[in-house]
Image (cartoon, rainbow, N blue to C red):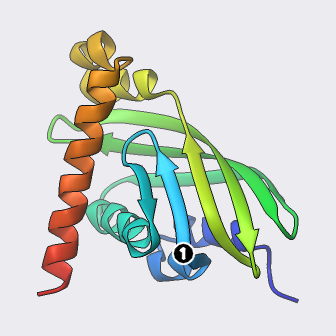
Amino acid sequence: MRRNPIESFYKAFTDMDVETMVSHYHDNVWFADPAFGALKGEHAKNMWRLLISSQKGKPFIVKAYDIKCTETEGSATWEAEYLFGQSRRKVHNVIHAKFKLHDGRIISHLDEFNLHLWATQAMGFSGWLIGWTAFFRSKLNKQTNALLNKYEINQNK
């Protein structure tokens, strides 16, 4: 019997084993969160590759719990603790994840978290000031997707 794919996904995440993480994604996976917006397929997988590669050698702690999984759907809560940006501000982000499964693999993954709280931790007063706005979310999505595009271009060289 195959292991719970959501449990295995987070075990790999805790171990910073990105290829095992993305192996639990269906080829047509849809992923969304407040930082990146919606991503599909290989872009969703590459987002995790980018995230893990950017955290190598840095303090980065992932804890997942309350993992639930049926044949078709699941959920989890996970927490990430890390230092953000050049200012190295401490971030403790609590994320609620919802999943849909198809053929034993994750086909849909939605991560939800308080973007205003994240922005306040990551950017201080300016994050507190604008982190709740649609403008901030849009700008953040553009910046993170630009980083993802740059990462993908560099991987294809």
Q: Is residue 138 above or below residue 11?
A: above
Image-quadrant location for residue 10: bottom right
Residue 90 located left or right of residue 70: left
Residue corresponding to mark 1? 28
Given residues 117 and 144, the one toward you in this image is 144
Q: State the image coordinates of residue 52 (x, y, percent, origin top left).
A: 37, 66
Q: State the image coordinates of residue 141 (x, y, percent, origin top left).
A: 29, 42
Number of on-image labels: 1
Q: Is residue 58 above or below residue 18?
A: above
Image-quadrant location for residue 51: bottom left
Given residues 58 and 129, the one toward you in this image is 129
Given residues 13 and 31, the one toward you in this image is 31
Residue 7 in view here = no
Query: Helix or strand or loop: what does disc 1 sit on?
Result: strand
Residue 1 located left or right of residue 132: right
Residue 7 located left or right of residue 132: right
Q: State the image coordinates of residue 104 (x, y, percent, origin top left).
A: 76, 79
Residue type beneath disc 1: Asn
Tell me the quarter of the image containing the C terminus. bottom left
- Identify which residue is drawn at 22% across, 15% down: 126
Tell me the quarter of the image containing the N terminus. bottom right
Q: State the image coordinates of residue 47 (x, y, percent, origin top left).
A: 37, 63
- Identify which residue is drawn at 25% across, 53% down: 145
Residue 2 in view here = yes
Q: For the residue carrying disc 1, how many other residues have a C-alpha within 10 Å: few (<14), some (14-19), or many (20+)?
A: few
Q: Is residue 19 above or below residue 109?
A: below
- Identify which residue is drawn at 43% across, 72% down: 45
- Identify which residue is drawn at 41% across, 29% down: 118
Q: Is residue 21 above or below residue 76?
A: below
